[in-house]
Image (cartoon, grey):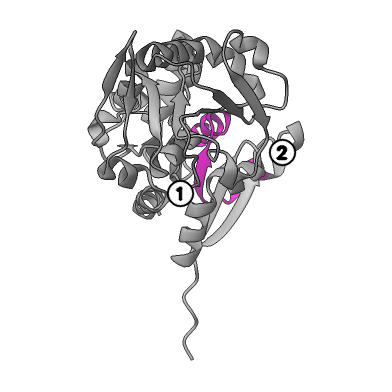
């Protein structure tokens, strides 16, 4: 009697294991359906270094999928481990010479890993140091269809630790839209526990706090994507695109995310800002099914 085929083990690694469930659940389900034995772990769970995981990477290196900048850097240092590194974004570190130098050395040393870079601007930078067989542009983690509102309300999705960094850009976008529409539209802020109205004085703002995942876009039909943090391709932006929201976005961010290359058109409203009505090609490119299938293809190549 022949033995059943042994499934390949695939380990998802993040700063905290909970982040794998939050952002990689679709990919994990697809990998399991394709025959992988899927596991999840965190490098810094509960604020402590996971030494057990580090020992495993040294002694019995699994096939891995790793996300988030800290975890990415650690796993790139383990150059002999095979797998996929999802580069969510280089953030504000991109302009630091020492950081860039370390990153370049690690990228060049990792020929057993594929790099999936979410931001088009980061991809253009990193592909200078990794050949096209290893460095790939995959926009985002995959958006899912969510209910949206029918009113001309602008929705901003942020976290408490980021809102102050993007508030100046967000106010500029609101001002540009108000001048264009000759009307001050209401802004609904989702995802912040703390009071944030003082960051938007003079604007019609409502803070909705934390909402269920399927309700984060439900109050409006316009989605505000600010600049100022330097993340890769925001998960909420992908959700807004798939859900067919009109995007309010600066031209600089439109180019950095590569939306034009994915089939979107930018309509200027002045002061460097514009609106984007997602095309079918853009929605398809950032949809969860498309992105997860692309990630799995890269995993298979390194497995």
Label 2 SS:
helix
Magenta residues, as a range?
A: 53-79
* Residue 57 visible to an observer of this rendering: no
What numbered label is drawn on residue 45? 2
Left-right relation of 45 to 295 = right
Residue 66 covered by magenta stretch? yes
Q: Residue at x 34, y 52 (%)?
A: 301
* Residue 159 visible to an observer of this rendering: yes
Which of discs 1 and 2 lies nearer the camera? The answer is: 1
Which residue bears the numbered disc 1?
145
Label 1 SS:
loop
Quarter of the image for the C terminus: give it: bottom left
- Say whether disc 1 or disc 2 marks the residue closer to the N-terminus: 2
* Residue 42, percent from left and from top: 65, 42
What numbered label is drawn on residue 92? none
Q: Residue at x 74, y 31 (%)?
A: 47
């Amino acid at each position: 009697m022949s033995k059943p085929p042994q499934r390949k083990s695939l380990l998802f690694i993040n700063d905290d294991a909970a982040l794998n469930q939050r952002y990689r659940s679709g990919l994990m389900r697809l990998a399991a359906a394709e025959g992988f034995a899927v596991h999840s772990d965190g490098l810094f769970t509960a604020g402590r270094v996971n030494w057990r995981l580090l020992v495993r990477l040294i002694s019995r290196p699994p096939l891995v999928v790793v996300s988030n900048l800290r975890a990415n850097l650690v796993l790139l240092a383990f150059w002999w481990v095979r797998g996929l590194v999802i580069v969510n974004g280089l953030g504000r570190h991109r302009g630091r010479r020492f950081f860039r130098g370390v990153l370049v050395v690690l990228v060049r040393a990792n020929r057993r890993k594929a790099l999936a870079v979410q931001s088009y601007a980061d991809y253009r930078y990193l592909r200078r140091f990794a050949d096209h067989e290893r460095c790939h542009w995959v926009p985002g983690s995959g958006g899912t269809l969510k209910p949206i509102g029918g009113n001309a309300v602008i929705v901003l999705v942020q976290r408490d630790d980021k809102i102050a960094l993007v508030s100046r850009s967000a106010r500029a976008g609101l001002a540009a839209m108000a001048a264009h529409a000759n009307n001050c539209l209401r802004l609904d802020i989702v995802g912040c526990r703390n009071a944030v109205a003082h960051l938007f004085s003079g604007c019609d703002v409502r803070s909705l706090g934390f909402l269920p995942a399927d309700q984060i876009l439900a109050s409006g039909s316009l989605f505000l994507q600010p600049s100022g943090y330097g993340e890769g391709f925001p998960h909420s932006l992908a959700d807004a695109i798939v859900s067919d929201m009109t995007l309010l976005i600066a031209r600089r961010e439109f180019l950095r995310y590569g939306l034009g290359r994915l089939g979107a058109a930018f309509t200027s409203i002045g002061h460097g800002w514009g609106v984007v009505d997602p095309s079918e090609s853009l929605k398809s490119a950032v949809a969860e099914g498309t992105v997860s299938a692309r990630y799995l293809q890269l995993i298979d190549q390194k497995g």
